[in-house]
């Protein structure tokens, strides 16, 4: 979601009539916009990622005018400019450039700030923070064509918003944009847009030149995009061009690209708009409502489309160039569904063809829960993301971590439920001064070897006189409730337990879990004053065992 | 008769005390007995019934009349009676007109009654609208007044009578006295009690039923100490399932009842399943490190995703028009949504007619606060089939909301990179107003075709379960859903909807 701010008087000026914002709530909702706030003369809203055409007042006004029906969608005439850009020496790591010219615009402060807002929002969202695409706007009349997009070993110009001429090294250190985006250019291979007289347009994707900046006097705009993704560049350039066009422009020209890896066709084709066949059968199949094509398309102009031909079973719909979200027929069908109103689409949900079922892991977990609650254990819950320091203190050395944690205490993926159980035990015993406590958790852990999600059931018995036997009795009773005969085998235990008080739980030679008595040194760390017996049983393995054919137990 | 030894008859302490009193007095009222055994009357009524059923006493009722001076009676007794006042006036004035009579400051009823009495004593006569005295009647009047005064004085303290003479009823008519009828229970000792009084033994007061009481049938010879319910009751400690898991299990049941089969998928996931297969472009903001947890491991060994990887990549290049990078698709993340599971299931099962769901944990970089957690739950589901439509999705949402007790659903257009059309369903919360809880849509063909689903429609959703659980449980802070505090777990009630009620109100 992108947060956009527009002035209501600018909006009214663009729409051509004064409209009450309150009366627009359905229209804004149909455009998938969420109003964040209306204050004095500004409207702040969230726009969805797929509608960059709504990231500025120009596009919003256009969409509202169509929705209100006060303006019919029109096709735009686009021509190739006689001016051109030469990209034969473009840097190989950022090889593409595309440009358009929008003639006859009338700009004031607000119009300029809307275009810059659009540019910035696009940079942050679609342009991958300028890594994939960067956008520049210039006063065409300050430039001498052809312009060149080329790789240079040094640059020298006055960066936008600074009073003096700098070289590349200075710009990367001293300007804010330089520090932020400097990593996107290579030293000695600086991408530069420069005109025939040597006036610099910009050092993309970092900063523009002060000398070619857009002002209120600008009547003819040159818009460029440079980057690594031609199709993305073309759609970004289309969105910006069409927004600028709304500022009273007379014509749009595409600047031919000479000597580059791609030509200007990609943007030329996009700016002329596309035609999509929309089938009546697809409308009824996808929405689930029977409609004639004519009924379905009755309000489609409100979404900016133009119906070019209407047949019995298929219509050809012209998609306006700025609707870069439209990929195929189904996108048009969504707009049809929106014009029907989702709340009016109702009917019976078809009955299922199969019976439903709980996953065996959850079915078994539920019974494990029942048995453990019956054994007087209270169920606790904790997070899968946990504190790596707590894990390592309890000698759980192997676990998976996240690379980009927000908080260190939630940066490790638990490999066992026991560290969490012991922490919860300690917390409750201290908080309520309990003499005895039995708790358990059934939850998923991430196996540090296989990275698989594994379901475990673990518990702890706390209180004076607690021994391994208390844990063993629970494990035995619990498994017998599932018709299994556990065998307990002595084994080398983890450091967490007293090595003489540790067993592995097996069923027919398959290890299912462990039971042990926590070593006093860890009880001390947990600030517990009485012994603790713990158990941890793999529910995932239990489910596998239970899936096997029933064996007759020998007496 | 439950007698522990032929020589003694053991009675509970209260019964024993009553039996002792009656064997001495022979007969007494319940009030008297109660006083003597130090109890309230209402407390011994059951004991008397018990003794009667065992043949030791007979109870019967007596009717009493309680006669007492009224306020009016007391006033006249200390001053003059109306008869006296009238008579005195007649003595001094000879005769009185009815108007003069009225001016004596007596009530109208009183004047009439007094005139009636004086007439019956033949001490006055009425003629020509005036009342005059009959000669030599003073003595009759004085005697009468004296008798009445003495009579009234007897009732200046209450007197209990078994019968009320007619004269008293007359006096009551004038309001000088009150007569109230009382019925009282009496008990008298029976022959059995008299003959066996030497064998009576006092039993004990017990607070706990002992094995002996059961074994020796001695429940009738002990008294169970009355329980005082006004004292603060202790709480029983209870081992319970965690309330959040109860809600999750209820959701499972609801989904199963609608014909859905539950599936599972891993928490550590390939970006392929979390993003690429869902047609989320590699440069989409949802894939930035501020929005996804990356895992410090790499995919080990050979992956079995080769075929789908190529198909997904082709789809991104064709329809999104960028240089899709397979290496990015093979990075490991913590899944940001359970829609990854839906993608895996579609790839595994392919074409067909099926409904599956999963309820599980997902992860997004966040700092815990009342409305955010880095780890939470989603309920993702899909309906796959040839004739599945957006209408079915909306209808599913309506039925799910009803099942969760959330009421009516309103829909608004929404955006998700993998669905078209896309929708957000809102339910009305009594405090928060319309809140978003039901996001979904129809999977795009760019999602379905690389997974091998052709000419099929799939309704899909990913519902944030925590928010619904918070509504159901009346919890305002999401962190409380994940509590490990045993007292909170003990005391949190089971949500109404799980018990067949509604979630709101």
Image (cartoon, rainbow, N blue to C red):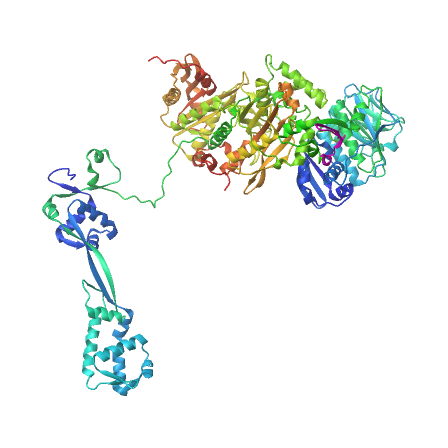
Q: Can you say whether B220 is above or below A135 in the image?
A: below
Give yes or no for residue A494 being in the magenta stretch: no
Quadrant where the image shows the N terminus of chain B: top left
Between A554 and B127, the one lying in front of the other is B127
Residue B296, placed above or below residue B119: above
- Between B359 and B131, the residue placed more toward the observer is B131
Q: Please state the horizontal and vertical placement of residue A332, each as a whole percent of the image.
A: 70, 30
Q: Considering depth in this image, is A553 or A466 the residue closer to the camera?
A: A553
How far across and down, in percent of the image, does residue A144 sit? 89, 28
Residue A382 in the image, given as x and y percentages of width and height: 50, 28
Q: Quadrant of residue A304?
A: top right
Residue found at the very far left of the displayed protein: B195
Give coordinates of residue A555: x percent, y percent: 33, 13
Does the magenta-highlighted stretch encompass residue A319? yes
Q: Residue furthest front?
A: A312
Q: Quadrant of residue A399?
A: top right
Can see residue B107?
A: no
How many labels, in total?
0
For residue A367, say whether it is visible.
Answer: yes
Choose between B385 and B497: the one closer to the eye. Answer: B385
Q: Quadrant of residue A35?
A: top right
Left or right position of A238 against A433: right
Q: Which residues are magenta?
A: A300-321
Side of A525 relative to B450 (left or right): left
Q: Is residue B131 left or right of residue A297?
A: left
| Residue at 73% across, 26% down | A277
Q: Is residue A11 left or right of A524 when viewed as pictured?
A: right
């Amino acid at each position: 979601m992108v947060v956009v701010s527009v002035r209501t008087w600018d909006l009214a000026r663009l729409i051509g009539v004064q409209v009450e914002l309150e009366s627009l709530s359905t229209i804004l909702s149909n455009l998938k916009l969420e109003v964040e706030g209306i204050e004095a003369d500004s409207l702040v809203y969230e726009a969805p990622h797929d509608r960059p055409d709504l990231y500025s007042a120009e596009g919003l006004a256009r969409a509202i005018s169509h929705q209100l029906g006060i303006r019919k969608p029109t096709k735009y005439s686009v021509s190739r400019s006689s001016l051109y850009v030469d990209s034969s020496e473009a840097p190989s790591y950022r090889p593409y450039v595309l440009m358009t010219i929008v003639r006859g615009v009338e700009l004031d402060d607000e119009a300029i700030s809307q275009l810059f807002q659009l540019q910035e929002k696009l940079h942050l969202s679609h342009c991958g923070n300028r890594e994939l695409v960067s956008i520049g706007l210039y006063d065409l009349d300050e430039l001498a064509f052809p312009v060149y997009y080329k790789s240079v070993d040094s640059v020298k110009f006055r960066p936008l918003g600074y009073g003096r001429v700098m070289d590349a090294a200075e710009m990367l250190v001293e300007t804010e944009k330089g520090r932020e985006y400097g990593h996107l250019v290579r030293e000695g291979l600086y991408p530069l847009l420069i005109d025939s007289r040597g006036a610099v347009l910009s050092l993309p994707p970092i900063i523009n030149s002060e000398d070619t900046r857009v002002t209120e006097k600008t009547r003819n705009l040159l818009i460029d995009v440079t980057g690594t993704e031609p199709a993305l560049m073309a759609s970004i350039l289309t969105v910006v061009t069409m927004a600028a066009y709304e500022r009273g422009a007379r014509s749009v020209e595409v600047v031919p690209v000479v000597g580059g890896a791609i030509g200007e066709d990609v943007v030329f084709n996009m700016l002329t708009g596309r035609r999509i066949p929309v089938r009546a059968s697809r409308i009824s199949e996808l929405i689930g409502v029977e409609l004639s094509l004519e009924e379905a398309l009755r309000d489609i102009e409100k979404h900016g489309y133009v119906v070019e031909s209407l047949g019995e079973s298929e219509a050809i719909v012209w998609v306006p160039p700025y609707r870069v979200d439209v990929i195929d027929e189904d996108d048009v069908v969504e707009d049809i569904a929106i014009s029907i109103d989702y709340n009016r689409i109702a009917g019976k949900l078809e009955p299922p063809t199969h019976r439903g079922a709980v996953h065996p892991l959850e079915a078994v977990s539920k019974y494990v829960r029942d048995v453990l609650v019956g054994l007087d254990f209270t169920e606790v819950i904790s997070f899968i993301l946990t504190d790596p320091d707590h894990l390592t203190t309890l000698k759980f050395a192997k676990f998976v971590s996240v690379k980009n944690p927000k908080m260190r205490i939630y940066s490790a993926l638990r490999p066992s439920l026991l560290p969490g159980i012991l922490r919860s035990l300690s917390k409750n015993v201290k908080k309520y001064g309990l003499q005895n406590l039995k708790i358990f958790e059934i939850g998923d852990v991430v196996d540090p070897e296989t990275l698989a999600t594994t379901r475990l059931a673990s518990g702890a018995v706390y209180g004076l006189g607690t021994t391994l036997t208390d844990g063993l009795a629970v494990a035995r009773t619990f498994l017998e409730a599932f018709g299994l005969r556990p065998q307990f085998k002595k084994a080398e235990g983890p450091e967490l337990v007293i090595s003489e008080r540790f067993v592995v739980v097996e069923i027919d030679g398959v290890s299912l879990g462990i039971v042990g008595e926590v070593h006093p040194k860890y009880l001390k760390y947990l600030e517990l004053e009485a012994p603790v017996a713990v158990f941890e049983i793999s529910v995932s393995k239990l489910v596998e065992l239970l899936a096997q054919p029933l064996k007759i137990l020998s007496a | 008769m439950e007698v522990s030894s032929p020589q003694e008859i053991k009675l509970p302490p209260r019964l024993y005390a009553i039996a002792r009193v009656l064997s001495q007095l022979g007969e007494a009222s319940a009030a008297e007995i109660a006083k003597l055994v130090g109890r309230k009357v209402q407390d011994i009524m059951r004991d008397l019934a018990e003794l009667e059923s065992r043949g030791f006493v007979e109870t019967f009722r007596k009717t009493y009349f309680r006669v007492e001076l009224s306020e009016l009676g007391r006033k006249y007794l200390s001053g003059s009676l109306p008869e006296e006042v009238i008579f005195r006036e007649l003595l001094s004035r000879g005769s009185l007109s009815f108007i003069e009579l009225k001016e004596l400051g007596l009530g109208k009823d009183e004047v009439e009654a007094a005139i009636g009495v004086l007439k019956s004593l033949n001490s006055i006569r009425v003629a020509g609208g005036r009342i005059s005295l009959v000669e030599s009647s003073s003595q009759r009047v004085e005697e009468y007044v004296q008798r009445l005064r003495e009579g009234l004085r007897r009732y200046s303290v209450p007197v209990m009578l078994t019968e009320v003479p007619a004269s008293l009823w007359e006096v009551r008519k004038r309001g000088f006295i009150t007569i109230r009828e009382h019925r009282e229970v009496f008990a008298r000792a029976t022959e059995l009690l008299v003959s066996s009084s030497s064998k009576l033994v006092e039993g004990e007061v017990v607070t706990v039923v002992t094995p002996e009481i059961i074994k020796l049938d001695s429940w009738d010879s002990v008294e169970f100490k009355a329980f005082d319910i006004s004292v603060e009751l202790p709480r029983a400690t209870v081992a319970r399932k965690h309330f959040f898991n109860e809600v999750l299990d209820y959701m499972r049941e609801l989904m199963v009842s609608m014909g859905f089969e539950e599936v599972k998928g891993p928490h550590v996931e390939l970006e392929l399943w979390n993003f690429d297969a869902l047609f989320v472009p590699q440069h989409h903001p949802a894939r930035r490190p501020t929005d996804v947890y990356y895992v410090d491991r790499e995919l080990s060994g050979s992956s079995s995703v080769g075929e789908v990887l190529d198909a997904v990549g082709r789809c991104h290049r064709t329809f999104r028009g960028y240089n899709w990078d397979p290496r990015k698709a093979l990075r490991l993340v913590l899944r940001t949504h359970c829609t990854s599971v839906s993608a895996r299931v579609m790839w595994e099962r392919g074409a067909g007619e099926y409904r599956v769901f999963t309820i599980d944990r997902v992860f997004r970089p966040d700092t815990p606060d009342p409305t955010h957690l880095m780890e939470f739950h989603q309920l993702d589901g899909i309906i796959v089939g040839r004739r599945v439509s957006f209408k079915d999705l909306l209808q599913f949402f309506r039925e799910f909301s009803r099942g969760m007790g959330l009421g009516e659903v309103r829909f608004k257009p929404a955006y998700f990179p993998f669905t078209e059309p896309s929708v957000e369903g809102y339910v009305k919360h009594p405090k928060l107003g319309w809140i978003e809880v039901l996001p979904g849509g129809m999977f795009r063909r760019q999602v379905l075709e690389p997974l091998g689903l052709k000419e099929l429609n799939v309704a899909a959703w990913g519902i944030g379960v925590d928010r619904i659980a918070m509504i159901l449980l009346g919890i305002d802070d999401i962190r409380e859903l994940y509590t490990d505090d045993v007292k909170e777990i003990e005391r949190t009630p089971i949500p109404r909807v799980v018990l067949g009620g509604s979630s709101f109100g």
